[in-house]
Amino acid sequence: MAAAVASGGSLTRAERWTILGIAAAIGVLAIFTNLGLFEHGLRGVRDSVRHQQASGELHIVEIDAKSLRMVDSWPWPRSEHARLVDALTKAGARTVAFDVDFSSNSSPAEDKALADALACAGGGVILPTFRQIGNTQDRDLIESLPIESFRAHSFLGAVSILPDKDGYVRSAPLGIITKNTPRPSLSALLAGHAGSAFVDFPIDFSIDPASIPRHSFVDVSRGNGARALAGKDVLVGATSVELGDRYAVPRYGVIPGVVIQALATETLRQGLPSRIPGILMLALGLLAAWWVTGSMRMRQIGLRFAIAATGGLVAITLLEEFAAMTGALVPAMLAIVAAAVPRAMLISLDKRRAAARIDLDSGLPNRKGLCNQAPEREIVAGVIDRYDEIAATLGSARMGAFVARLSERVAPAVDADIYRIEERVIAWVAHDEMSDDVIDRLRTLLLHPVEIDGRRIDVRVALGVCRTDDEGSVSHAIDAAAAAASKALELGLFWNSANQSVLGEAYDTLSLMGELDDAIDNGELEVHYQPKLALASNRVESAEALVRWVHPVYGRIGPDVFIPLAERHDRIDRMTLMVTRAALETIARIDGISVAVNLSAKLLFDVRFNRALDELLEGHPRSVTSLIFEVTESAAMSDMAAARTALEAHRARGITISMDDYGTGQSTLSYLRELPIAELKIDRMFVQNVHINDEDAVLVRSTIELAHRLGIRVVAEGVEDQGCIDFLREAGCDYVQGWLVGKPMPQSDFIAICQHNATLAA
């Protein structure tokens, strides 16, 4: 096949059939493999472009915040539910269903009141039954039914809904078995659909939850608005955030469980679509795969693949919308991918052969050209950091021009031709040794952004050096120099010599830890401060303290290198105390400022550290209340009881506790209520695109609302553009932190900003 591509670029019929056979085998394998999460993702895309209104025949009577305020206890007296049933019965509601647990007895009088109301309703009320795991260790199942006096005059509907592995609820059961009896689900009963035990159906999230009519429990139970429910089906359940019955779903973020039950009911009301056989879907995918293999260029492959994938997605969406038919797209999509990838690889091979000694994207000479250079010289390689991020910003088509522009800057400084030996690696032959002056000149030169298409791109390049006479092979020297540069980049250095084994000596663990001890003792570690903007006052009122190490010989060593080593080798306590001391001194110099220090999980329960901390705090009594300890979710959740005790001790010292990177772990509302948390930091992965991503927006708004209800202030990390900060301001976020507000800076610069009351965002 390679010969065919090299000669004319086209494939023979036999070669196309071979690729198609591989694609068919992969597609058939996909049919019999559980690829549910991928299929869910495609279903979410389809639901996002469809939009339906609810039928209006199902209404939600919600136990909302207003109802909780008026009935100031939970669980409510059963007479409250009895009053609602009586009101709905009197109003002529068609069916009443409860998503409220009635599996335990209350007082005899209260239970009798509800039982009497159910009897008066004439059996038109559905009560919940469910199965749940009672113990996380032995995984025993608990099956719950309403108490016996309630079952005599009601139907039982299953309300158990389990999320998928990623935590999102996407489907609901038609029925389950409790107490050895098959029970239709609550949604199946309300929709009049036949129930089948342990058979799930996908919830249609193209239905807008906001279009489902909702009424406050206390309004209806007191007779206000009950007439609107005449002839309607009524679903009763909790929507108040305080009750915690909320789950993540595609498209709409976190919503109450009763709303999910209502969406499931509406889904069944409109009828479940019939399924197109998987083999037929795969056959259509193979037709598209055959078309894709006829591509002659990479761009053509991408275009045909996009047309085939988009066409399939649009077609199945239209079938679901207008013909009540659906099918699995993943096997067909995988078949198309399986055909496109080898075709793309063959075209790429042809391009590589044609390139010969010139990098076609940048116009620079390539590795083959560099190998022809005379031996006994130093080869210098430069690895471009964050290459993929830059490509995402500029577009892959402009990366060649970007590398060429970077090379134009480097060439005069080194007086040599620049070669592009790999996508993200440039190289040249050094006529002189890499002296300190040359290294400093290059370091200064590369600090300035590279401008391309009117954009200024910050670029960091790490250098590696290798002498060709040591190995006798230019090709080997190129590889060694590139490897040395990659190692320098990994460890936060500007350059590294492959010949002198600088890294092997300098980064020996014991040696590095010894130097870290000296750096702490001699004050060589620097504490920088990244500002936090208070959105209410539009002023910097807080900061996060971050440690930096500039080695006198090897330059900047990244915190991702030395902090994990410090934790493993018991230096993290000394470093944290040093940063805390600097933070307290900074607080003392600025009125009204607070400073956060990252607290390692290892130090939460360290007696020696806490004793030293007490001694340190005694010398700064006025600054302690402005000190913040940031702990990660994983640290707090690993041992809840011990973490609560440790954090309470810090709070007793006057230190504010902040939970860092919220959202990346397993924290829940109940955990936040148990821990002495005063501040919550939402991780940057949820913040950066919050103003353009609806799901992130819903999650961030929900988090802010929940935190504020618990009296916790909220800090959003990773704010990098004005649209993001505008959204967070409107959502009620308290503080924002990120490069738009300010990068980490020395103490003197931070103090200057605070003293001049600088406003960093509009």
Image (cartoon, grey):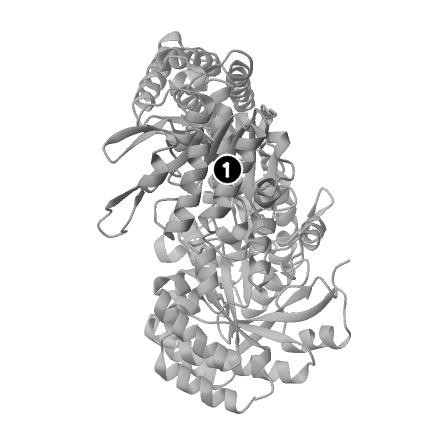
Q: Quadrant of residue 151?
A: top left
For the question of whether residue 170 can be seen, the reply is no
| Residue 711 rendering spot, x and y as whole percentages | 58, 64
For the question of whether residue 578 can be seen, the reply is yes
Q: Quadrant of residue 738?
A: bottom right
**Viewed as shown, does residue 501 lie left or right of 379?**
left
**Viewed as shown, does residue 623 lie left or right of 647?**
right
370, 260: nearer the viewer: 260
- Whether residue 650 is situated above or below residue 170 in the rendered picture: below
Q: Which residue in the structure is indicated by mark 1?
A: 85
- Whether residue 426 is situated above or below residue 552 in the rendered picture: above
334, 248: nearer the viewer: 248
Query: Residue at the spot x=68%, y=81% of the render?
Result: 590
Query: Residue at the spot x=43%, y=54% of the render?
Result: 665
512, 9: nearer the viewer: 512
- Whether residue 492 is situated above or below residue 8 in the rendered picture: below
| Residue 706 rendering spot, x and y as whole percentages | 56, 55
Question: What secondary structure is marked by label 1?
Answer: helix
Q: Quadrant of the N terminus?
A: top left
